[in-house]
Image (cartoon, rainbow, N blue to C red):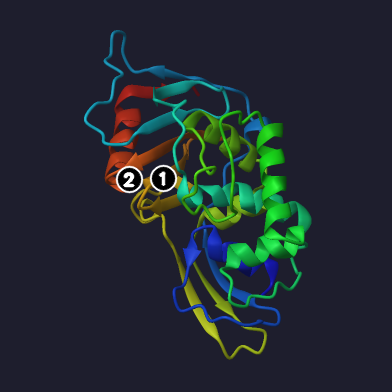
Amino acid sequence: MVFAAAIAAFLGLTDPSEPSGRVGGASIASTAAQQLPLAPDRVTPRPPVPLADGLDLSISGLSARAILVKDPVSGYVLFEKKVQETLPIASLTKLMTAMVVNRRVQSEELVEISWEDTQMALARHAGGSVEVFVTEMNKEAERLGMEHTSFENPVGFDAPNHYSTAADLSLLVEEFLRYPELLEIVSTKSETVYSADRHVRHSLLTTNRLMMEYPQIVGLKTGYTAEAKGNLIILSDDPGHPGYEYFSIVLGSDNREAETSVIMNWVLNSFRWAP
């Protein structure tokens, strides 16, 4: 499988019917990627301000164990809840996996997919072994200042030494925003992928259902395990101004989509961004 198609398969575009085996040069026939905003380092910071003096800026009644809402351009934190609590992060792990793979694998390289999941095959291909690759993930986390994060696998399987915090994940998101080729993938709602001989076709759909409902959402990543519960990171764009508006991180939620919707409405009714 070509690297670009392989990495799309685990960054939120999924097809349960994906067969095992080697696909000699898959090609992408169509794309529905959003128009991406400018990266944070290319715009002037414009911190959000409350819509009115004395406005109640609290959010209550959400089941999520940790929440962080942040403007990545100015660094302004709009809301936080237990952002230093270490929690399982499920497939949010794959943001780090994708960045490490992206630096090690060329976009048109063939990746052999056998019995392994796509992400395990990519890790083995990029690092020589999964163990070496995970070591690289942890080194990158250390470089980014993610002091309360530990990776044990490239997938996000629940494990004793696999965890992060909402605060650490915000550092990961801000670094991820510097990879336009990866942002294009997580902003894509659907893809049709063909094998090199054009005989095998797969329709991939994003697992981020809110992207179908809110045009201002331009990615990022979903995650779920029984232990982690519902995790969701979304990146919101303000169509009227250049640059990202904010991202929200929800960890350990009973209903990640509904609670993220509550957060988005709260931001809309509580803040404005200066022109």
**In the rendered image of this protein, does residue 83 appear above or below residue 244?**
above
Q: Amino acid at mark 2?
A: Arg
Residue found at x 55% / y 31%: 168
**In the rendered image of this protein, does residue 241 appear above or below residue 153?**
above
Labels 1 & 2 near each other (Cβ < 8 A): yes
- 92 horizontally vs 171: left or right: left
Q: 10 Å neighbourhood of mark 2: few (<14), some, or many (≥20)? A: many
Q: CA distance from mark 1 to mark 2?
A: 6 Å
Q: Quadrant of residue 143?
A: top right
Q: 10 Å neighbourhood of mark 1: few (<14), some, or many (≥20)? A: many
Considering depth in this image, is 213 or 263 the residue closer to the camera? 263
Q: What residue is pinned by disc 2?
A: 256
Is residue 99 visible from the viewing direction of this image?
Answer: yes
Residue 221: image location, x then y, percent: 48, 50
Q: What residue is pinned by disc 1?
A: 232
- Looking at the image, which residue sits at the far top? 54
Is residue 241 visible from the viewing direction of this image?
Answer: no
Residue 68: image location, x then y, percent: 43, 30
Residue 100: image location, x then y, percent: 70, 50
Residue 77: image location, x then y, percent: 47, 22
Q: Secondary structure at mark 1?
A: strand
Q: Amino acid at mark 1?
A: Leu
